[in-house]
């Protein structure tokens, strides 16, 4: 990093790294989609979710390790921004575009309701409970409360994954008539060689994204400070960066 320090002060190099970071994120999501297409539904959703989570968590951790003032709130701000962008932005845009082009949209109530219930519970644990607890002076958990929230969230999401992939798998698959209608539009699954290549390139893209995020962290915080914007803008930027390719893929799919 000492060798890169003089370059990090130059605008053109910062812009180049930012473009490369976006390219790494897009590449990671693309290769995750190839692997997901190979695994098939509903496992493809897990592949995409894990890949996006790794990217976002890596960006958050890289910025939190900077230990600047307010960096401890980046994770909360990024998660809150992600929930709001997905629920109000991505889903809303998908519904609008589907209705605009096809005049109707069908989905499975069973899978949608269970996913929304889990999301509501997890968001409550992470975003609401720290604001209403009185065990600490600030909007924080005690160590015991943090451990409980972590274990409860892990158990809740683990149960949801079990329902999604094993016990109630049909709830998260397209309806039989939709599968029959769209059977001719699905592309052939990639070969084992292409899937293995995508897995390798996915790991490389994730590693590149983490390294570039850590290198760009000082420039991002300096830009936010120079603009006089609140620290929450950093979390929003992370959420928008990670969700941009997935949002585009979702709109294209509908």
Image: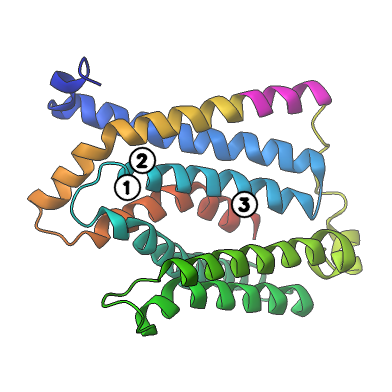
**Helix, strand or loop at disc 3?**
helix
**Helix, strand or loop at disc 2?**
helix
Nearer to the camera, 15 or 69: 69
Neighbor class of circle 2 (other Cα within 10 Å; few <14, some 14-19, many 20+) is: some
Residue on which disc 1 sits: 64
Q: Residue at x 68, y 46 (%)?
A: 47
Residue on which disc 2 sits: 62
Q: Are marks 3 and 2 in contact (CB under 8 Å)?
A: no
Residue on which disc 3 sits: 49
Q: Are marks 1 and 2 in contact (CB under 8 Å)?
A: yes
Task: Give the CA separation, mark 1 to mark 2.
Answer: 6 Å
- From which residue to which does the magenta span run? 192-200
Q: Quadrant of residue 18?
A: top left
Quarter holding the C terminus is bottom right
**Helix, strand or loop at disc 1?**
helix
Q: Is residue 226 above or below residue 171?
A: above
């Amino acid at each position: 990093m000492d060798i890169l320090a003089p370059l990090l002060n130059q605008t053109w190099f910062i812009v180049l790294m930012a473009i490369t970071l976006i390219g790494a994120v897009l590449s990671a999501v693309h290769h995750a989609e190839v692997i997901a297409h190979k695994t098939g539904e509903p496992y493809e959703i897990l592949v995409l979710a894990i890949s996006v989570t790794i990217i976002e968590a890596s960006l958050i951790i890289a910025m939190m390790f900077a230990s600047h003032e307010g960096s401890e709130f980046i994770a909360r701000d990024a998660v809150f921004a992600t929930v709001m962008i997905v629920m109000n932005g991505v889903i809303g845009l998908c519904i609008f575009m589907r209705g605009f082009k096809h005049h109707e949209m069908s989905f499975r109530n069973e899978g949608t309701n269970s996913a929304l219930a889990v999301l509501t519970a997890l968001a409550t644990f992470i975003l609401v409970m720290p604001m209403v607890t009185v065990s600490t002076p600030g909007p924080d958990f005690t160590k015991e409360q943090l451990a409980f929230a972590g274990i409860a969230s892990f158990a809740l999401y683990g149960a949801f994954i079990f329902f999604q992939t094993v016990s109630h798998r049909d709830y998260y698959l397209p309806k039989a008539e939709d599968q029959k209608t769209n059977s001719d539009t699905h592309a052939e699954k990639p070969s084992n060689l292409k899937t293995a290549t995508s897995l390798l390139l996915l790991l490389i893209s994730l590693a590149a994204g983490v390294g570039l995020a850590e290198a760009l962290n000082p420039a991002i915080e300096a830009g936010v400070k120079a603009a006089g914007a609140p620290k929450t803008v950093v979390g929003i930027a992370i959420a928008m960066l990670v969700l941009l390719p997935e949002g585009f893929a979702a709109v294209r799919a509908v």
